[in-house]
Structures are given as structure tokens and as C-alpha cells.
Image (cartoon, rainbow, N blue to C red):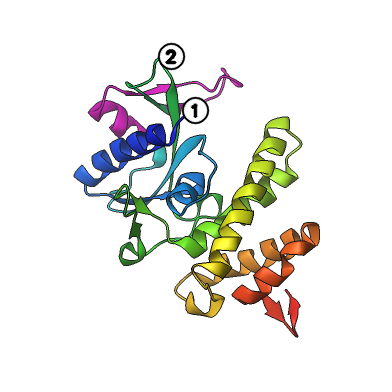
Amino acid sequence: MLTLDDIHSTAHAVVSILRASDMVACLVGSAAGAEHGISRIPNDVDILVLSGAKSMNPAEMKNLLVSKDSRFFLEKPVTNPNASYFILKYRLISSQNNSCCHVDIFLPGMIHLPPIPPSYIIYSAQTALPTMPFFPTLLHKVQAWLAHRASPKESARIKRSNDEQDISELLDFAVKIHKVKIENHTWLPDWFLQEAIEGVRAYVQEHPETAPMWKEIGFCANNKVI
């Protein structure tokens, strides 16, 4: 079982190496959600590399991390030892049982992730980790929920439940703390906002009790949630 300190130490190690290689990156997924205040401890660290990659793909970035810090290593996925790809893990030196943290590297456009202008990246007051802004973090979590809902795997069912917990908390923050309004986020790509509209529509169909909160954010037309 990972701790929040494990997530932070892993994220700092990744970001530090990428920054030293002139790459701009930020936390996304549940790791970003944790920086925004969700109570659930993430199971891994997801990193979005935004610029300075010099045509490197995620696999090459993983190799870079392994070459720069011996605590990073690559292994075949346990569920598919014949896979043609490797997953990246970070060995937690503070762990008493040789635990590791899984790290995923993404580029804009992968798994519905939008490009984030570097000036919009936020830095956690507690950890100083670069993090995707609050609103796209919430909207991307809805996309993750859609993907996990569509999968027949048992692991996806568990992830879907986690997504719903995260969305519930983030949505509450959006309305009560951040006072989010969709019209103030036109800097996000049109394709991402359109996917968000479709995702929120599906989410409200399954969780109608959340409709008033989505409506408060601005997901409505003719006084009905889109």
C-alpha cells in the first residue's frame, strides 16, 4: 500500500530528471487529484510531458529516467509477460517491503489529455510539484470514468469506483471552493471541451444527483444539464 509520501517522492524524482533535460511536465490523473485535495491515495504517478521532449516518445523518456536514476527500472507487465512493451517503476527506498510505484508518461492527445500551456501549470503549496490545473483535472477524471465503465475487466470496475469517489470530491470542490465556470476556461482545446460535454452527459445519466452541481459549473442548455 503506497503512502502519499511515496507518491510525492516518485513524482519529484520524475519531474527533476525531466526538468534537467529541459522538459516541461506536470502531474495528471489521480496524482494531480491528490494535489488538488482528494482524500484517496493514488495507486501510481501519471506525468504529462508538454514541451522540450525533442521528439522523444514516452518509451524513450522512460529509458531516460532509468539511465539517470537507478531507482527507476523497467519490467514486463505482470498480467502480460509476453507484451512488447515495458512498464516503468520507481523503487521506494523508504519502504520496508521493497515497494515500488508505477509511473506512466504521456504526451498531449494520449488518453484524452489536453495540451496545457506552461503558464497554466500550478505548483502545489505543500509539495511544489507541477500539476495540471483544477478544472481539466476534474474533466479528465470523467474521461477516465468513461473508459473504465466501458471495460469488462474486474480491475476496471475497481478503478471506476475510485473515479466516482474522486469525481464526487472534485465536483464538490469545483462548486464550493473554486467557483468554477466553464466559460472561464476557453483556453482549453475545443475537442477537449466537447469530450467533456459528452462525458458529463453520460455521468449525469448514471449519477443524476450530481446534475445541479454540473449545472452550476455551466454544463447546461435550456436550463437542463447537457
In this orientation, which residue lies closer to the viewer: 44 or 56?
A: 44
Q: Total number of numbered labels? A: 2
Residue 135 within the segment the image draws in magenta: no
Most extreme residue toward the top, as rendered? 97
Give the Cα separation between the discs numbered 2 and 1. Answer: 26 Å
Name the residue that disc number 2 marks. Answer: 97
Residue 73 within the segment the image draws in magenta: yes
Q: Is residue 120 above or below residue 217?
A: above
Which residue shows up at 48% across the image and 78% down it? 184
Most extreme residue toward the front, as rendered? 176
* Crowdedness near tag 1: few (<14), some (14–19) or many (≥20) residues, C-alpha within 10 Å: few
Q: Which mark is residue 110?
A: none
Circle 1 SS class: loop
Q: Is residue 3 left or right of residue 153?
A: left
Q: Amino acid at mark 2?
A: Asn
Which residue shows up at 54% across the image and 72% down it? 190
Q: Position of residue 82 (x, y in %)?
A: 57, 18
Q: Is residue 156 above or below residue 93?
A: below
Q: Position of residue 122 (x, y in %)?
A: 35, 60
Most extreme residue toward the left, as rendered? 20
User: Where does the magenta region start and end?
Assistant: 60-88
- 2 vs 1, front mark: 2
Which residue shows up at 43% across the image and 20% down it? 99
Which residue shows up at 51% across the image and 38% down it? 41
Q: Position of residue 114 (x, y in %)?
A: 48, 60
Quadrant (top left, top right, bottom left, bottom right) of the C terminus: bottom right
Q: Amino acid at mark 1?
A: Tyr
* Crowdedness near tag 2: few (<14), some (14–19) or many (≥20) residues, C-alpha within 10 Å: few
Name the residue that disc number 1 marks. Answer: 85
